Amino acid sequence: MLVIEGQRRFVLGLYDLPKLPDGWEQARSAGFNLVHTRPSAEDIGLARRHGMHTWVSVGSISAVKRSADQARIRAIVEKFRNDPALLFWETEDEPSFVWKKREARISPEQIIETHAFVKSLDPAHPLYLNHAPVNLESTLQRYNAGAEIIATDIYPVIPHGIREQYALWPDGQQGDLSDTTIGQVGRYTDKMRRVAGPSRAVFMVLQAFAWEDLRKENKDPKMVLYPDRGQIRFMAYQSIIHGANGILFWGLPFVPSGAPLWADLRSVAREIRDLLPALAQPAAQLTLGIEYRDTGHSLDRGIEWSARPIEGGLLLLCVNADRNPVEATITIPARFRRCQIAAGGADVPVSRGAIAQAFAPFEARALRLS
């Protein structure tokens, strides 16, 4: 977990502001605490004035332009390293990924050299490295010495029948696991936790766009599919349950005015905002008993969960990772006598130390136990 101003902080960020006249205020009021900016005094100053943090991309040092790259990076780092809004630096995005090819776009050695150079100028700030979801874990681990924060971007809301395009495989998927549902987000979080190991933070970069909107021409309106509020909520909660220390959203510049996505994303962000102090805490160690009732479907992954300590009790995050509904009786620790929905505070009946819960496919739920 990142420690900011002496406190553990869960990061909720955006690669870009929404395309609205008051984008900074919209992001701040929604609960986002981090926005990517250019290495610009104006942009970083705007982040500071809105009480938000920022991160800045510096690129990397290539063998053919080493002196020029070092001079460019030095100028950026020395100019902004003492700005209180700066949270971390980024080198290159998806360095190991080349679509449909095996060779890395940028070598681990190049990223590691750049990391060492930036750290020589600014030892105080960590470096961030986002990977594409594909490539072997062993390949991605070769980059670990180049970052303190490891991430991956997974964007699984894709309409059936979409035409092939950059970063979508012939089967219409961005990811390459056997699970093609939005439940793959948790599996990629697990993958990045294994890649990062115990000493690095893991961020998940989630979908805030429609794949068809990425086309520069010949867009098919029937193929424009945005993640809806429930899908955004599920992907965010599942990332947290599987161990993410931060969540970032990518794609807002491609969302046209009037699309429903920002309203849905803002709603989810506001809910997470109210949970941020709890999400920054280490996961509580406890055992839940889960007894499922037959709904006429096989049980694939069922209810995934994680708990965090809060004042007077626990925050219990749950998702149904199945593409079918599930119903279960969840036995909670005996010391808890009350259960409430975290958003709104509605009571959930507790009977003989257990709560009955019915989840729709890919539904997420946050409960407070006291």
Image (cartoon, rainbow, N blue to C red):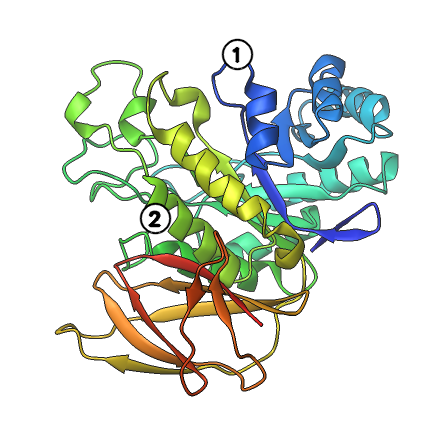
Residue 21 - label: 1
**For mark 1, does the 10 Å Cα neighbourhood hold few (<14), some (14 to 19), or many (20 or more) residues?**
few
Q: Could you tell me residue 277's position as x and y percent?
A: 67, 54
Residue name at image x 86 percent, y 42 percent: 123
Q: Could you tell me residue 89's position as x and y percent?
A: 71, 35
Circle 2 residue: 175
**Mark 2 or mark 1, which is nearer to you?**
1
Vertical placement of residue 309 versus 336, above or below: above
Kindly state the secondary structure of the residue where label 1 is placed.
loop
Vertical placement of residue 268 versus 216, above or below: below
- Left-right relation of 107 to 98: right
Q: Is residue 131 visible?
A: no
Kindly state the secondary structure of the residue where label 2 is placed.
loop
Residue 56 - label: none
Residue name at image x 48 percent, y 52 percent: 343
Q: Quadrant of the N terminus?
A: bottom right
Q: CA distance from mark 2 to mark 1?
A: 34 Å
Q: Could you tell me residue 83's position as x and y percent?
A: 83, 27
Q: Amino acid at mark 1?
A: Pro
Vertical placement of residue 134 versus 196, above or below: above
Q: Could you tell me residue 298's position as x and y percent?
A: 18, 74
Quarter occupied by residue 161: top left
Q: Earlier in the sequence, mark 2 or mark 1?
A: 1
Number of callouts: 2
- Left-right relation of 159 to 144: left
